Image: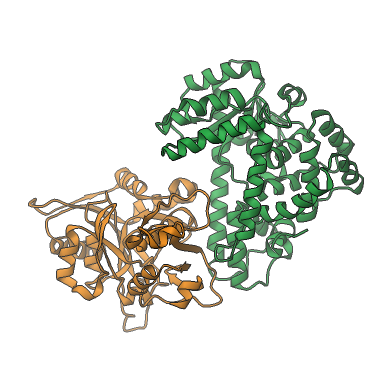
Amino acid sequence: MKGLPADLKTLLVAPHMAGGWSAERWSRVAYLAQAAGVLTRISVDLTEAGKRTGLPQGLEGCLLSAERNGARNQVRLSWEMDRIKRVFWDRDIKIVLLKGAAYLAGDIPCTRGRLSSDMDILVAKDELAGVEATLLDAGWVSAKEIQGDAEDYDDLYYRRWMHELPPLVHEGRGTVIDVHHTILPPTGRVTADGSELLELAVPVESLAATEVEAANDPAERSRQGYYVLCDTDMLLHSTVHLFQDGEIRGGLRDLVDQRDMIAHFADRPGFWDRLIARAEYLGLGRPLFYSLRYAEALLDAPVPEPALKASQRFAPPLPVRLLMDLLVPRALTPTYLFDSNRVVNFAGELLYMRSHWLRMPPVMLARHLAIKAWRRAGGTKTA
Amino acid sequence: MRGLRRGTLKFKVGPFVARIGTTYPLLQQDFLDIYEGYPLAAPEDFVHFNLKVGPVSLLRRWFRPKVIADGGFVASPFVPLPGDLAILALEMGLNWQVGTKSDQFLIFHSGVVAKDFEPSATGEVRPSRAVLMAGQSGAGKSTLTAGLAYNGWRLFSDEFALMDTSDLQLYPYPRPISLKNQSIEVMVERLGEEVFSRPYLDTPKGTIRYLKAPGDSLRNGDRPARLDLVVFPEYSPGAPAQVAEFEGAEAFAMLRGASVNCDRLGQAAFDAISDLTGRCKFFHLQYDTLDMAMRMVEDLMEEAA
């Protein structure tokens, strides 16, 4: 299997080994890291590893810029959590943070230097309408409306076929929130029952040593009261997002998240047995298989041998596996702007088609693509 | 030329190194004309920005050419432009990257020029001293910047002031100055044709000509300056010249308003702007002619010294 570019891999999995590189190598790898959305994480890790000296002229500024960006992103995310909680202060409702917000609130290692654009939450399906109404009442508006493009089809598409509401934007802050009721579209080859996930969700744990400290720390205050998915589900959600629902292309950051979660959860008692059993139960074995396979192969994730073996039961037929082994590493790998990227583009296109194929039944897909194509021909924007 | 075609051309703009590539012959010509005299990067220099400009498709290379900039980032706002305006795609592409991905600096949307001083008789080196010109677009900051840059001041930038928040030094970002519509005529008359690019007609901002950055600004692109003076010029034809000093909260708010990325820097930006508010002199300038404005800035700098 084709691996990641060597320097990028070093920075991601063993930053303490980085260094002694020419400016040309640094320039290239910094570009790749930025393109993959992992430059901030790498900057944080290089600082941690004491590797911020003796770098080529000009690189320090680039890393500082990335770090500042990350710090500000986390403040914003924290503040957004605080604001959203405030909206629901008088409601007895279980709000589960997903993705970036969950990693931040749960202090999962992949939160370091991670840039999140949107806030994602999961609520029970029968709470959905109420949650939307409350947010609309409190200053959020439909993103489509803001673009002046309140096309019914997009809205209808979301409401009828998706696992989340159409994105809502806060008028004052411009921040986006995605409200989910499950983690996969109900139309897909694989679906997931949101209520199962909600049931095992756990309250965010306090990271403060004392109550006084907790009360005085804004980040601590903003995370209190929320839920996050339990460890197995948190990992499964990320794998689903990358390998089942997403298009894989450009998803290296997600695989890095998964690697960190694997390493972080690996030593919890019975984690691997629980993980395999949970994937089986929820019907999410296939994306888990891919995640463990590629996180191990590309990012040296510490997956124990028995777990890798156990996940084999979720493997696709051999020809599919061989094809995926060919495509996935290429689609995940960013290319330098001045290098030819034809192969990567082709791999990306194929996987993009796959992602649509997995999302909806053929007839519906044909209809969806026809509507999109017709609208594109007419010059209107689509979702 | 070959480096440009292959995308191996690396040149320095102040503290940055940009790597540029284009296979579009007209752009190669325009670029080499406007960027003549820029220092090339050394092998030991890190490349901050990568940019490719090319036709949007094979068809559009030859038939009603359209070009677009590509910096390799998914969320970039670049739009296709007619082939004749390819240099604009490059200029905007580079400015966008600098404006959104250089948070090591506190950036102000402004023109900056500085006075350099010879070492004194005792050999003591005196720091260069800068004036920052901010304000609405159309207020005449480009014209004023251009006028000063060719009249005893060193061009730092007509677009972005780059401030290191750790020592409050301004760094040069000497780029070609884009002059629009009426101001072109005024400046061509002053400076002559040879320092200008060819005209670009029917751009989104009307007619544009690029004024080349003076040679000394390129050779001294790594020499910072300290900021002493902040002015908000306003061109008002027929009105009497006016200079109005302001300070304190107003100065803070005006400077903050000119900043491109202070919210991304947070505390570091707040502290820097606070310090500058206490240290610099701030003025609103109302002027009628370019000469008048230039004299005002000269005088104010004398006073601030």
Estimate the x, y position of residue A136 in percent, counting from the top left.
49, 21
User: Residue at horizontal 35%, vertical 76%?
Assistant: B36
Asked where in the image residue A306 lies, by quadrant, the reply is top right
- Which color was chain B given? orange
Question: Compared with residue B34, is residue A305 higher up or lower down, i.e. above or below?
Answer: above
What percent of the width, then of the height, locates residue A251? 65, 48
Query: Where is residue A142 shown, x and y percent of the image?
Result: 47, 27
Q: Nearer the viewer, residue A369 or A54?
A: A369
**Apparent side of residue A55 relative to residue B132 in the rendered image (left or right):** right
Q: Nearer the viewer, residue B96 or A111?
A: B96
In the image, A50 versus B207, the foreground residue is: B207
Residue B124 in sight from this viewpoint: yes
**Measured from the top left, where is residue A333 in percent x and y?**
66, 56
Q: In which quadrant of the rendered view does residue A311 lie?
A: top right
- The reply, left or right, for residue B8 in relation to residue A54 is left
Outermost residue on the right side: it is: A306
Please name the colour scheme applied to the rendered image. by chain
Label count reads 0
Q: Is residue B163 visible?
A: no
Quadrant where the image shows the N terminus of chain A: bottom right
Residue drawn at x 49%, y 31% as measured from the top left: A169
Q: Colour of chain A?
A: green
